[in-house]
Amino acid sequence: MATNPLDAGKSTEQLLAERAKRLQDAMELKQPDRIPINMPAGYLLAEYGGVTHLELQDNWETQQTLLEKLALEFEPDAILGLYNSPRPSLALGDRMTIWPGYGLPESGSFQFVEHEFMKAEDYDAFLRDPSDWTIRTYLPRAFRELEGLKYLPPLGMFAFGHYNLGNLPMLAAPPVAASVQALGKAIEAAVADAARTGESVRRMMALGFPPPPLAGSLIEAPFDFMSDTLRGMRGIMLDMLRRPEKLLAAERIVLDFQLEFALNFAKTTGLKVAFIPLHRGSDGFMSLPQFEKFYWPQLKEMMVTLVNNGITPVVFYEGVWNQRLQYLTELPRGKTVGWFQASDIFKVKEVVGDTMCIMGGMKNSLLQSGTVEEVRAFTRKLCEVVGKGGGFIMCTGVGEMEGSKLENVRAWVDATREFGVY
């Protein structure tokens, strides 16, 4: 049963239905009964429960108990705990991530460590056969426990059918066998994590809280895909100048197989959302001519294709997109969600408020170091300006609330309920 005045006396079933509808209406650019609140708690759960980040990360029941307790105390429309798990990464010796207790202090925060796993000279092999290059070259570089895969024969040899069976003893070679065993352990860890996620969703729904609005497949803008885990920032910036045609050809390839993945994911799971975090398209990373050539056309095609297949792109516009907002007006109206980190949220409303649902608004820094009065005043402005007419989900600018003062979180939630009623 809810304790806030707007929901007092309602059953969990009624709360679940109303919260889910509130979020869906906002996502579809409609005006719900009031502004929905999405709370990406993250490591705030550890601070709330007085445990280390390591304990929160490694003890699922502790994390789930704290998630339920925080949800019942603040009663947002949706809430999210830790976004990802270290277990498959640890099983494979992932070289691109470090975690609390695994490369970081026990109360450190997850970090992505960028490498140039794809060299400039790899483009030809990638373009010729991306799957073969990925398995025999990329995976051994990116994951310590998969180094044995570099001893595999060209994967195309498996199309040799019966005549290739004589090569099967190669798979029993100790380095290859060790890599296959490590992959099996990672699969077991991922399956266990998926089961815990499913259990968490069921438990939260039983308490009246729907899944957060980014529940679905995870894909990236083709430029970001090539940069984040393959070429790195330095490499991709050089590629735009030294090998632009190869970069564009590679983007075409990764666009196609990501779309195939997202469409199949939606069909298999029934989750009609694709979460797309954007990393390198913001104002400070490239010029507008570069954006128009290497970033926007591919990203736009990705989103339009998803929309045409009944999938809602929920896009995290990381950094500042003030100079790029006009491009976003080209997207199908009421079919995408834009989560804005540090853009001028009032300019965002002015430019794309008639195009997409806007998520975000609350500055993480304000929850961390502001006063209750400052939080309340800014929340009211967000509700009255960005929330005008609907199509707005109140959320923090970053999907992590680590370091937030609980009194500020309370002021934020209460003010949203007070000023966010239509």
Image (cartoon, helix red, strand yellow):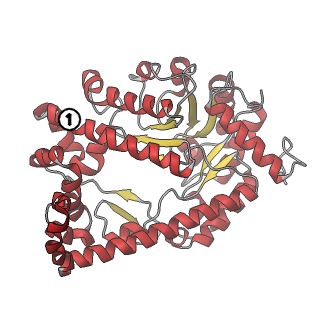
- Does residue 215 appear anywhere in the picture? yes
Q: Is mark 1 on a helix, strand or loop?
A: helix
Answer left or right for 353 relative to 288: right
Q: Residue furthest front?
A: 162
In this image, 292 relative to 108: left or right?
Answer: left
What residue is rendered at 19% in x and 72% in y?
Answer: 148
Query: How far across and how far down the image is residue 161, in percent?
Result: 20, 63
Q: In this view of the protein, can residue 100 be seen by the observer?
A: no
Q: Is residue 395 above or below residue 74?
A: above
Q: Where is residue 76 in the image (x, y as percent from the top left)?
A: 70, 47
Using the image, determine if residue 347 lies above or below residue 102.
above
Give amino acid for label 1: Ala
Quick one: label 1, few (<14), some, or many (20+) residues within 10 Å? Answer: few
As drawn, is 216 to the left or to the right of 320? right
Q: Mark 1 points at which residue?
A: 249
User: At 56% from the left edge and 47% from the top edge, which residue is drawn?
Assistant: 271
Residue 58 on image: x %, y %: 51, 72
Q: Which of 379 and 322 is in front in this view?
A: 322
Where, quadrant-wise, is the C terminus in this rendering? top right
